[in-house]
Amino acid sequence: MNKVSLREKLGYGVGAIGLDLSYGMFYSYLSIYLTNALGISPAFLLIITPLARLWDGFNDPMMGMIVDKTKTKMGKYRPWILIGAMLNAVVLCLLFNNPGFGAGSIGLYVYAAVLYVFWGMTNTLADIPFWSMVPSFASEEKDRNLVSTIARAFSGLGQGIISIFTPIAVAALGGVAGSKLDAMTSDTLSKGFGKWSIITAAGLVFFALVSVLSTKERRIVVNNEKFSFKAAINVIKSNDQLLVFMLFAMISNAGFYMTSGISSYYFTSVLGDLTLQSKFNLMGTIGSVLAILVVPVCSKFMNNRSIYKMSLSMAAAGYIGMAIMGYAFGESVSVTALGVFYILTSLGTGSMFVNQTVMLADCVDYGEYKSGQRNQSLTFSMKGFLQKMAYTMQAVIMYASFTVTGYNGEAAVQTPAAKSAISFLMFIVPPVMMIISLIIFSKKYKIHGEFKREVLDAVSEK
């Protein structure tokens, strides 16, 4: 690890900014763009979301195996990071720019569905090789904590840019002075999101290029076995701790995505002012920035297992505080009051994500410990897949609620039932998911303590 300079660590981490610019646009704002700007039915999105994830179940492991077999002068990770970023940027722009299909037309629905799937595929091209590089930088827990923390810090910065500035940028680029509910017409949203997506896509490519040019790949192990879905599935199935990790991480991530996905609806339909979301997200970003200190500082006197439990507990506590304020004051709730508790929530979720990256690296070692074969990129392909599955869980719950309560994106005022559903998804569902995830982690995840040292020693000796 001492051969990796701080400049290279920072250069690597910068790539996460671009990835999260695209993540944020897709996971936090695509829903409101499709329903409120294009008038697409939530029932349609309820169908297309799980279908897209079904394809990802084949695509993501396949991409992981392809990366594991890649051998070029640039290495096996960096070429794919750059190719994936450029393709994902193109798809992002197309996704948020309707070429002229009429509202409600079959062409519009087909266009949205195809690009929805393509975004996931092109995102995978960049995401898997980027995060797969973490184990190649370090093998020790503290070293992996540092690399993961730097990457997660930049990832949080990218997410912060999207969450804070998107509501303001959409209003400004859409041609309105403010973003009150009556000013945010479908035309305003279409123009604003279209222009803003081009800016964020350019950022994605720029930061990917910086990351690729700043890093050098180490500990490269090329898997020369012939690819097959059966082999990929067997590798995943044989790593029982990877499956446990996938389960508890997917549930907690779904709680996080629920907040980022439903908050735009909450501030638009319940509180009536989308710009309030910028203030709310600014306070969340403060928590995310502070979160980068949690793992490095706490690791001096706590192990990663205890830190992770603490992170999930902080996230749940913050959500519960938000729920109390939200239900106590209703539509007159202070955004500052919500934001104070959101700082605590973001502090927990931010450190949670750092720990998850470290744990996934540990799952790579555990897989090699059990099978004798190191499937680094295939294992890390599960990170992107679990994020997509978490988003799917969040989206299915949200779109099902919209369908049942009669949410209408083109209506100026939503029904009381729709508003109640939005508040429930905003305040109640996320903490429940965090608590369930904590219980599963505490009972089922075993790569810690003496057993973790045994795994690392065995892999290092090999």
Image (cartoon, rainbow, N blue to C red):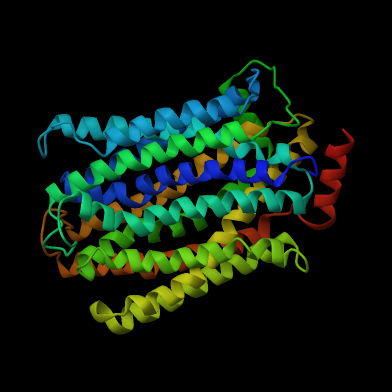
State left or right for residue 84 relative to residue 380.
left
Kindly give the residue lying farthest to the right in the view shown. 461
Residue 128, above or below 342: above
Kindly give the residue lying farthest to the bottom in the view shown. 328
Q: Position of residue 84 (x, y in %)?
A: 47, 29
Point 26% across, 39% down: residue: 96
Q: Position of residue 116 (x, y in %)?
A: 32, 35
Q: Quadrant of the C terminus?
A: top right
State left or right for residue 379 relative to residue 187.
right
Q: Position of residue 10 (x, y in %)?
A: 62, 46
Q: Position of residue 61 (x, y in %)?
A: 55, 30
Point 31% across, 54% down: residue: 166
Kindly tell me whether residue 142 is visible in this rendering: yes
Residue 410, above or below 337: above
Based on the displayed image, in which of its 4 quarters is residue 221 positioned?
top right
Point 21% across, 67% down: residue: 273
Kindly give the residue lying farthest to the front in the view shown. 7
Based on the displayed image, in which of its 4 quarters is residue 213 positioned?
top right
Residue 250, above or below 88: below
